[in-house]
Image: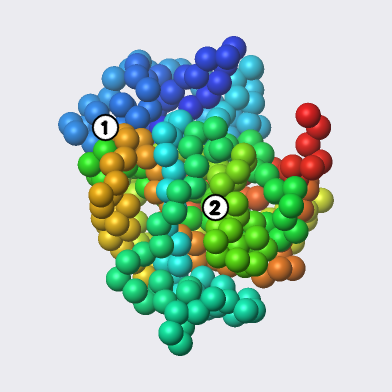
Amino acid sequence: MMKIFRVIRRGYYICYGIVGNQVIRLDEDPIRALIRYYENREILGDKVNGLDYQMLLSKFEINGMKITKPLDPPEVWGSGITYEIARDRYSAEGNIAQIADKTIYEAVYDDERPEIFFKGNANRCVGHGEAIVIRSDSEWTVPEPELAVVLDSNGKILGYTIMDDVSARDIEAKNPLYLPQSKIYIGCCAFGPFIASPDEVENPYNLDIILKIYRDNMIVCESTTSTRKMRRKIEEQIKYLTRDNSIPDGTILTTGTGIALSKDKGLKHGDVVEISISKLGTLITPVLRRDNIKS
């Protein structure tokens, strides 16, 4: 059982593993470490004393050491409408395109083929304590708390993590062909603070997910769900992602959200988003609006 996290210090990335209560400085990059652990449960590295990673999680930076995303994913993909609430809430938003007598969201929920979309790559992602972003042309951007999996090039699950599939819902709602603009931009994706090995999680379909949004240090939104409500198995989502589509080691697939926020729950500049998932910890990210960011 292992969790991986990563820090930046003096411009260099350092990768650590947590095994039990012991912190180990890993001798290889996080993707290779996950593959090695998956293949033979081997961990290469030296034990570290005096690194208070719990303090690092709460402060984000101590002694010149700053926590960041646990790996640099070469690709991030999303799977959508995997929970019933997403089908129902999105279908009720107004003039939604239809296929036969169903909205497009109802149709994809009921269909054999899932919705799979490209989300981004490492330079569009942030980690624990780093800022997610509201597009300058969006007035209704929401966090989408999700369980995500880290995959090897064969589609094997190397680990699990928390992901926020930040989405400009007003852009997608206006026209589904605008989905890439809703989903893909700088700061559209946060994940971490850990990648947990599969034996750390055991059962991915029995995890509680809690979302909190803070504004001026007050909770303005709190919602919960569970992966027990996931309609599509993760293996099914992976099967369609990898069908006629090669992926590199370290690819992340996020598995859909069971929390769909209404227009009055949209993010604002200065908010803080907190997402907790059983066995995976808590991901905390401040919120910035693109047109409020000083260049």
Query: Residue 203's spot in the image, x, y percent?
Result: 31, 56
Taking the spot 26% from the left edge, 32% from the top edge, the residue there is 35
Q: How is the image coloured?
A: rainbow
Q: Is residue 103 left or right of residue 201?
A: right
Q: Is residue 147 visible?
A: no
Nearest the eye: 174 or 288: 174
Q: Report helix, strand or loop for mark 2.
A: helix
Q: Quadrant of residue 21?
A: top left
x and y, in percent, of residue 113 in the image = 32, 66
Q: Residue at x 68, y 44 (%)?
A: 133
Q: Is any atom of residue 13 visible in this view? A: yes
Q: Secondary structure at mark 1?
A: helix
Q: How many marks?
A: 2
Please indicate whether residue 183 sits to the left or right of residue 18 in the image.
Answer: right
Mark 1–mark 2 distance (CA, rounded to whole Å):
31 Å
Specify few, some or many for label 2: CA neighbours under 10 Å numbering under 14, 14-19, or 20 or more.
some
Looking at the rendered structure, which numbered label has been put on residue 107? none
Classify mark 1: residues with Cα within 10 Å, few (<14), some (14-19) or many (20+). Answer: many
The answer to whether residue 113 is left or right of residue 170 is: left
Circle 2 sits on which residue? 180
Instruction: Name the amino acid, label 2.
Output: Pro
Q: Please give the name of the residue rendered at 46% of the width and 31% of the height, measured from the top-left corner.
A: 72
Q: Which mark is nearer the camera, 1 or 2?
A: 2
- Image location of residue 26, percent across then percent down: 37, 20
Q: Name the residue nearer the viewer: 261 or 138.
A: 138
- Percent across and percent down for residue 62 are 64, 22
Q: Quadrant of the C terminus?
A: top right
Who comes first in sequence, dot 1 or dot 2?
A: 1
Which sits in the foreground, 84 or 8? 84
Q: Residue at x 18, y 31 (%)?
A: 40
Q: Which residue has dot 1 on it?
A: 35
Q: Amino acid at mark 1?
A: Ile
